Amino acid sequence: MAQSTDAEQLEKIYDTALTQGKAYGWLNYLSNQIGGRLSGSVQAQQAVDYTKSQLDSLGLDKVWLQPVMVPKWVRGTPEFAYFETSPGVTTNVPICALGGSVPTPPKGIKANIIEVNGIEQLATLGKDKIQGNIVFFNRPMDPTKINTFDAYSNCVDQRYAGAMEASKFGALGVIVRSMNLRSDDFPHTGSMGYGDQPVADRIPAAAISTNAADLLSTSLKLNSEIKFYFKQNCKEFSDVESYNVIGEIKGSSHPEEIIVVGGHLDSWDLGDGSHYDGAGCVQSMEVLNLLRKTGYRPKRTLRVVLFMNEENGLRGGNKYAEVATSKNENHVFALESDSGGFTPRGFTFDCTDKQFEKVVGWKDLFEPYMVHYFKKGGSGADIGPLKKEGLVMAGLRPDSQRYFDYHHAENDTFEQINKRELELGAATMASLVYLVDKYGF
Amino acid sequence: MAQSTDAEQLEKIYDTALTQGKAYGWLNYLSNQIGGRLSGSVQAQQAVDYTKSQLDSLGLDKVWLQPVMVPKWVRGTPEFAYFETSPGVTTNVPICALGGSVPTPPKGIKANIIEVNGIEQLATLGKDKIQGNIVFFNRPMDPTKINTFDAYSNCVDQRYAGAMEASKFGALGVIVRSMNLRSDDFPHTGSMGYGDQPVADRIPAAAISTNAADLLSTSLKLNSEIKFYFKQNCKEFSDVESYNVIGEIKGSSHPEEIIVVGGHLDSWDLGDGSHYDGAGCVQSMEVLNLLRKTGYRPKRTLRVVLFMNEENGLRGGNKYAEVATSKNENHVFALESDSGGFTPRGFTFDCTDKQFEKVVGWKDLFEPYMVHYFKKGGSGADIGPLKKEGLVMAGLRPDSQRYFDYHHAENDTFEQINKRELELGAATMASLVYLVDKYGF
């Protein structure tokens, strides 16, 4: 049988995704039957079992679990916070512990609160002003950035390193404005770290909703003596065993050349992890399903990897790369989807100019699908550890406008997923994988 | 002062929209303080008053109301429907009267129901099979169309003309599958017509939700003798006076050349009309606001027109064109936003090849804003009647994937609007208007 043309193959892929796709049903199960899948949780294990069973049912050549030790951080009872403008006059505010934070003392922390515009301002204020107080990091995301990730990367240091830095000036705890461009009532969690700080020096960190951050900031302008109270009893347990879930189709003519497509199976615990990164997982699974359903027999080995523990450790990504290196595997292309299940706009590529030139040569094939954005840039956290000369890495780039509305928050739920947008993302990934497999680099 | 470069001016426009925009606040008022604005309703009049007062506050050169007689169709009490698989065994289903439909008799209609795949199938079945029954138009929208409007245009004849055509074969009423690509429980209304049919021959028409349409279809496969019951008491009253709301900034050097930007102020009555077309109205108002705020003084006359009665009559669009012709006004460019407040992808242009060439020359300026889609094509219903040689007409093209999730349904509400997406649409329109004003055609 003559090989159908590339345009025809892409059309088959998109049509199949939009009419017989499995991604939305898979995500419905992950989100609504399992829910938030924090590393080390029962739900994370249920997600491992479920996705493995689904990959098993696709008739791939091989499906397996790759063991990896992961951190187990548990939120505990819901956090509680208020600010007090005068004795007994309090306003409750929505907060959530940042992932990896230590707890407050059992009775909570109550202290004056100092607003800063970022980590840099700590040194300006100095120990005199900060010691014994809570620090409130309130630099907002910049709404003029068209790509919302640019606004995120300019703020997220407050969340990641705010506690570590503020503790050096004697702060008792930190409250961080949620990484969110909207004004709403959802606190957004996310990872934070203490570096190599001794455990005794670590102070608790929580995110506050954007609405409450604005209210607190305004109140502080009227009365700088406001006291802030918060309580959280999150806890870090010993590492536990978990798994990357892997499935593959052996290549027909170059089985030793491996193409990886993946997302991360763990999520935060507040929502059900539909966009972050349930969407990326089911899209990655769907890539193999779509290529099979459309009758395409890959020349190279296609592997889907559902990485464990991207959110608070990247242990899965590191483990996968470690095993690949130890087995001397030859990865030629890696594609990640971890930017939400929104309408796909294109890809960013981490590769040489020559490789990029080849990719750009395929761009016109995507035009009927409104996929137009082919740029050099980052790929994804989970595939990052695979980086080596020759390997082309890419990230799916969906429309980013709504990304931070749901990111790491209670409202990251299945209702916020549009079936077509999710399916178009999967088809876009499958189309790129098809072209890479067919033509190589 | 030296004129800033075009790239700088566009940046100013986008920055201003994203930081000081008025569109979202205006839409909040229209949606949450006023609500659905069906032509001839109290809410439509409130919307006229509110938007006029807001345009008045912008310091334009002139704001006025243009009287126009509009139809007044009223839904009445909520519709009710069920199907009966055997005597007394009934399943209620969500329906809504189509706009312009006649009512059922006060006691409703109960009859056998015949499923068809479209108007063409009526002749195949013939009067024998249809007479005395209800016709169920159930051709679904094609999910493989990437642009969802292509799927809509291939189905909407069932909604618009289904009743008129089915009545010729003796049908008692029609039930039409909602124009919706999702499986959900919302019936979607929309306009329908009877042409020049005598009033006595007109039969009632209602939309049924996609979930209920699927359920009914499956049930009919098991039992073709199913009876369907529906009741609606909608009513057409005499025409009433309403208004197009118009504001303008006089051109500094070519005041006789008019650029129009607009959306339609009326909406259906089921939701609050946030996407259809509240978004287009506030974006059009925002175009003038953004150009003023960024200090741009237009050479040509810029006019915002909020058209009345697009949904069920187009009286506002027709009246505006009629007055323009009678005054011998010289319109050089007309831009409409009536495709929802989603992330802007580009524009379609109804113009000559030479004019289109000029427009495409500006495309690169939009690249930083992810606006990439410049195609020849339709513009918009309201500006349609202005069409004449030389006039360039354009439509804003937002991402279309979620369009039919909300279109003409109860869930077209303010919660479904993302502030940034709305603002990016307004900035994209203002940028094009700026370029047209500066360079002409």
Image (cartoon, coloured by chain):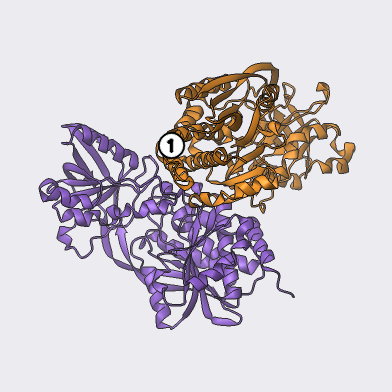
Chain colours: A purple, B orange
The amino acid type found where label 1 is placed reads: Thr
Residue count near mark 1 (Cα–Cα under 10 Å), binned few <14, some 14–19, many ≥20 = some
Pointer 1 residue: B294
- Residue B110 in the image: x percent, y percent? 76, 30
User: From where the camera sits, is residue B191 visible?
Assistant: no
Q: Considering only vertical position in the picture, is B240 above or below B113?
A: above
- Residue A174 left/right relative to B247: left
Residue at the far left in the pictured view: A128
User: From where the camera sits, is residue B219 visible?
Assistant: yes
The residue at the point 65 percent across, 38 percent down is B393
- Helix or strand or loop: what does disc 1 sit on? loop
Q: Quadrant of the C terminus of chain B?
A: top right
Q: Chain of mark 1?
A: B
Q: Quadrant of the N terminus of chain B?
A: top left
The residue at the point 50 percent across, 76 percent down is A332
Q: Considering only vertical position in the picture, is B109 above or below A69?
A: above
The residue at the point 31 percent across, 65 percent down is A71
**Count of residue discs:** 1
Q: Nearer the viewer, residue B45 or A350?
A: A350
**Which image quadrant is residue B72 in?**
top right
**Which image quadrant is residue A315 in?**
bottom left
Q: Nearer the viewer, residue A254 or B47?
A: B47
- Residue B260 in the image: x percent, y percent? 60, 32
The residue at the point 45 percent across, 62 percent down is A47
Q: Nearer the viewer, residue B37 or A364?
A: A364
- Residue B130 in the image: x percent, y percent? 84, 36
Q: Considering only vertical position in the picture, is B282 above or below A415?
A: above
- Residue B184 in the image: x percent, y percent? 60, 43
